[in-house]
Image: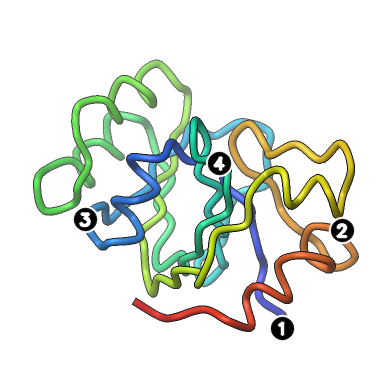
Amino acid sequence: MEELVYLMSIRPQYARAIMVGRKKFELRRIHAAPLIEEGSIIVVYASGSVKSIIGEFKAKRVLQSTPERIWALTSGSKTGIGEDAWQYIKGARRAMAIEVGERRLYERPVTLDEIRRVIPGWNPPFSYTLLEEGDPLLELVLKRVRARYQTL
């Protein structure tokens, strides 16, 4: 079975923390987006002022529960999850915690401008999206970039 690949928008400070190994879980509210499966690849789009795809990580475990339960399982200094993450998931009906597995930092980030030169009008997802075979971002950009990364 082929691996599932998701593109996830993450604020720059959290994206960096994931890529250097300080943040062990990425928390998300569960909406109508497809639920992320264990073993999937999460391509990291650092939003904000960075506006670049910087790397990826493997979803080691994916926990789904109430925000309170997710917070109890993932918060603390050992996980890199702080109070601001609680503010993000608090009030949701369901929440998800994606444990960061193997990380791969791309040799060079792929900027929003570079992506738009290949795929005019492209915009990153608000939260995350599944990249299916045939998706222009996966086919024209990521497959080439992923061939030249380092594992952290």
Q: Tag 3: residue type?
A: Arg
Residue at x 65%, y 72% (from the top left corner): 145
> Relative to 122, does residue 83 appear above or below in the rendering?
above
Q: Secondary structure at mark 4?
A: strand
Numbered circle sitting on residue 1: 1
Label 4: how many residues lie within 10 Å, few (<14), some (14-19) or many (20+)? Answer: many
Numbered circle sitting on residue 58: none
User: Between 57 and 90, which is closer to the camera in this rendering?
Assistant: 57
Foreground disc of the pair 1, 4: 4
> Relative to 113, does residue 84 appear above or below in the rendering?
above
Q: State if disc 1 and disc 2 touch (CB < 8 Å).
A: no
Q: Tag 1: residue type?
A: Met
Q: Secondary structure at mark 3?
A: loop
Q: How much space separates mark 2 and mark 4, taking CA atoms?
A: 17 Å
Q: How much space separates mark 2 and mark 1, taking CA atoms?
A: 21 Å
Residue at x 71%, y 53% (from the top left corner): 130
Q: How much space separates mark 1 and mark 4, taking CA atoms?
A: 26 Å
User: Disc 2 designates what residue?
Assistant: 136
Sequence-first tag of 2 and 4? 4
Numbered circle sitting on residue 9: 4
Sequence-first tag of 2 and 3? 3
Sequence-first tag of 1 and 4? 1
Numbered circle sitting on residue 22: 3
Q: Tag 4: residue type?
A: Ser
Label 2: how many residues lie within 10 Å, few (<14), some (14-19) or many (20+)? Answer: some
